[in-house]
Image (spheres, grey):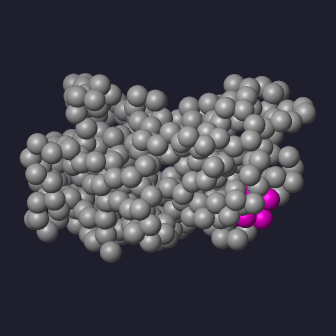
Amino acid sequence: MKKGIVLSLIVLMVSSFAFAQGTKEATPAKTDGPFKVGVIYISPPGDMGYSYMHDQGTIAMEKHFGDKVKVYRMEGIAENENSERAMESLIDEGCKIIFANSYNYQQYMLNVAQNFPDVYFEHCSGYLSNDNMSNYFGRMYQMRYLSGMIAAKMSATGKLGYVGAFNTPEVVRGINSYTLGARAINPKATVTVVWTNSWYDPSLERQAAVSLLDQGCDVIAQHQDTTEPAKAAIERGKYAIGYNADFRSMIGDDRVLVSPMWNWGNYMIPAVQSAMDGTWKSQSYWGGLEDEMIHLSPISPLVPEEFQKVVMAKEADIRSSKWDVFWGELKDNTGSVRQKAGEKMSDEAMLTMDWFVEGVIGKVK
């Protein structure tokens, strides 16, 4: 998920991201006893957000395989050379496949992968790969659009706020999707963005949300790792859109209208299975609704039932490939046409997105 690699490198690598299934295969893993799996998290699973949902995927994988696997977790690992040492420690424990859940782990994972060709490596959200290293992610922008529809429906002012971590294409794409969904319901809706320049900082996340509320925003969405932006909105009597996990059930307040969520286990289970049976292949994976990689939490009962049906109908259109978010004419927030009517944005363009659509108040750089 994380920021920091030069855009030109992304452009160079990304053309294969959405479709590449990889043709090279690492050496089949052989081990006595349980198959050992390592996972590395950017934050503690107790953040109730990003790492929490990754750990839910790990738990689903553990339940699927039972005593056939043994999992070693390492949490709160910084995105620097320490992550290399963490991976090497997992290898010392006998782990044959290692998952790392944060964007800026990718170069460090590649370094380790090149030194340990008989271990499989899985990096979440990046684009680097190797014979024994894959990258994987999901089309969360689709759920962002649906949540934007709900936010606009429930907003009394049309002023929506968004707490963003870093200006990576992933975060920018999500903000744009959310804005397009909102303006499909209220063409005058705006989305004001505040950057924290941190993936995991509960205090900064709360401060950013408060600043948006002070500007008159009455629905707060987020691309952050904790529940603090949502909590700040609720404490002000406003609405929130969660992320990663079902914030409404966690916080216990119906003013959390919905949460775009991940199903990481749906990727981890087949990845581990292929590593166990020797069929693992390097790939660049970007799954969506068709693979059940993403979904919406149950929608708050505060959202009118008839409108919930509208949202679900739009989700059905996405699932059937009848429609997708970045289809048709698109203008940026300076008024320039970025895509003409009738055109469909390529995966490469989505994966390198560095501009805001019309309706977003803020700058990418």
Segment tinted magenta in the rendering: 83-88
The picture quadrant where one finds residue 287 is: top left
Magenta part mainly helix, strand or loop?
helix
Where does the image place residue 313, in percent across and percent down from the top left?
24, 25
Residue plotted at (33% across, 48% down): 347
Given the current orientation, which residue lies at the most extreme bottom position? 365
Give the quarter of the figure containing the C terminus: bottom left
Given the current orientation, which residue lies at the most extreme front position? 23
Asked if residue 157 is positioned above or below residue 273 in the image, the reply reads below
Residue plotted at (24% across, 62% down): 356
Residue plotted at (75% across, 60% down): 115
Residue 82 within the magenta-colored segment of the rendering: no
Front in this rendered view, residue 287 or 209: 287
Where does the image place residue 231, in percent across and percent down from the top left?
46, 54
The picture quadrant where one finds residue 271 is: top right
Given the current orientation, which residue lies at the most extreme right position? 32
Where does the image place residue 88, in percent across and percent down from the top left?
80, 59
The picture quadrant where one finds residue 8 is: bottom left
- 146 sits left or right of 284 in the view: left
Residue 84 within the magenta-colored segment of the rendering: yes
Residue plotted at (65% across, 36% down): 280
Front in this rendered view, residue 265 or 186: 265
Residue 50 appears in the rendering: no
Residue 26 appears in the rendering: yes
- 134 sits left or right of 63 in the view: left
